[in-house]
Image (cartoon, helix red, strand yellow):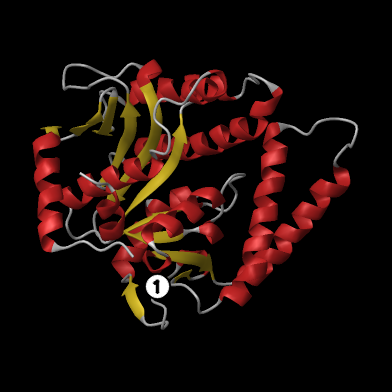
């Protein structure tokens, strides 16, 4: 289990304070040719990030080679989260205290006068938060399409940096807002397993919405429909293949939920996100949002967890201790 002491927390915050370039920009040099950057989305840079997203989507949808099929699907899935962050910024920036940040790994240094070139961005994620909710949201972490292509053509320059990047995002947000206690997200199954393995299962609250039994029945029906309608003589589209895999994982997840009951901390959401409760291994409630917090959660963060997404579902939501996440990144 990852724990963080007052001394280690102070050390982390001293580093973050030194890495603050402006109020909306933090930069950490991890090693030669590897920089972690937290950049707040504003009216001045939203066009850059919108164009970055569009170009990345175009590259991701191109089939570099047949063996990239699964990688391509994961890239597209990752950028769905990035797209949601862009849309939430556009909708809520003028009507609520909502922040969207872009967290990324760059092969070159960034300054207040130097914008990162898209071709130098190796991995990207979005981080958002708002007032009156005790958590942040990380969505859409993915290696960029340009660097994913390089994994097939040459050695990855910086492998296994997703957890370090998540941790840096947690450190910056905790530095700015000490009252935030959890990070919530709807991770791909592989990322969920990485969280549990690296942070300890007692720091990862596996979530589900009340009424998940009906959702399981719905997923089984959709999966059966895809399987029965698939043309065995032709390749399925990348999106359909990914949707099938997502449904398979969801069915397996909920099928095992009953067996796993009582073995891990739990996050439960009321139907329609009417409630939000974190419970420890003993099923003791350790966090429950009040009415104002629920309203804020529904209007802002629920954007990411909408059920009609092809690539994610509110039922796969997890909550992660920010203290555990920020302590992962070794200074």
Picture residue at 62% right of the left edge, 76% below the top: 259
Looking at this rendering, what residue extends furthest in the right direction? 233
Q: Where's residue 120, x and y in %?
A: 36, 19
18 vs 134, nearest the viewer:
18
Residue 133 visible (yes or no): no
Q: Where's residue 83, x and y in %?
A: 46, 35
Residue 206 visible (yes or no): yes
235 vs 167, nearest the viewer:
167
Residue 245 lies left or right of residue 91; in this view the side is: right
Q: Is residue 185 above or below residue 58?
A: below
Q: Where's residue 295, x and y in %?
A: 35, 62
Question: Which quadrant would residue 71 be assigned to in this image?
Answer: top right
Image quarter in which the C terminus is found: top left
Q: Secondary structure at mark 1?
A: strand
Q: Is residue 107 above or below residue 304?
A: above
Image quarter in which the N terminus is found: bottom left
Q: How many numbered marks are there?
A: 1
Q: Which residue is mark 1?
A: 277
Picture residue at 43% right of the left edge, 34% below the top: 159
Q: Within 10 Å of the Cα at label 1, are there few (<14), some (14-19), or many (20+) other Cα atoms? A: some
Looking at this rendering, what residue extends furthest in the front direction? 155
Q: Where's residue 309, x and y in %?
A: 58, 46
Picture residue at 73% right of the left edge, 65% below the top: 217
Question: Which quadrant would residue 27 be assigned to in this image?
Answer: top left
Question: Which quadrant would residue 179 be assigned to in this image?
Answer: bottom left
Q: Is residue 39 above or below residue 200?
A: above
């Amino acid at each position: 289990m990852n724990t963080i002491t007052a001394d280690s927390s102070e050390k982390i915050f001293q580093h973050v304070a030194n890495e603050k370039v402006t109020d909306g920009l933090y930069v950490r040099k991890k090693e030669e040719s590897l920089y972690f950057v937290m950049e707040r989305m504003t009216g001045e840079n939203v066009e850059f990030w919108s164009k970055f997203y569009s170009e990345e989507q175009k590259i991701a949808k191109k089939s570099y080679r047949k063996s990239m099929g699964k990688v391509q699907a994961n890239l597209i899935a990752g950028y769905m989260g990035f797209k949601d962050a862009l849309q939430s910024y556009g909708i809520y920036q003028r009507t609520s205290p909502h922040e969207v940040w872009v967290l990324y790994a760059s092969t070159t240094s960034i300054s207040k006068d130097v914008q990162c070139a898209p071709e130098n961005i190796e991995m990207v994620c979005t981080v958002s938060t708002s007032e009156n909710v005790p958590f942040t949201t990380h969505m859409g972490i993915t290696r960029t399409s340009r660097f994913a292509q390089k994994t097939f053509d040459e050695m990855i320059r910086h492998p296994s940096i997703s957890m370090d990047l998540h941790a840096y995002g947690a450190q910056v947000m905790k530095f700015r807002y000490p009252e935030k206690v959890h990070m919530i997200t709807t991770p791909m199954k592989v990322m969920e397993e990485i969280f549990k393995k690296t942070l300890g299962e007692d720091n990862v609250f596996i979530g589900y919405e009340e009424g998940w039994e009906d959702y399981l029945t719905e997923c089984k029906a959709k999966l059966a429909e895809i399987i029965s309608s698939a043309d065995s003589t032709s390749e399925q589209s990348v999106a359909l293949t990914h949707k099938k895999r997502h449904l398979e994982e969801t069915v397996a997840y909920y099928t095992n939920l009953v067996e796993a009951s009582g073995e891990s901390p739990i996050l439960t959401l009321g139907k329609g996100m009417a409630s939000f409760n974190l419970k420890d291994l003993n099923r003791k409630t350790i966090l429950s949002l009040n009415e104002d917090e629920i309203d804020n959660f529904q209007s802002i963060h629920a954007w990411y967890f909408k059920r009609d997404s092809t690539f994610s579902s509110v039922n796969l939501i997890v909550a992660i201790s920010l203290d555990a996440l920020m302590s992962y990144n070794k200074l």
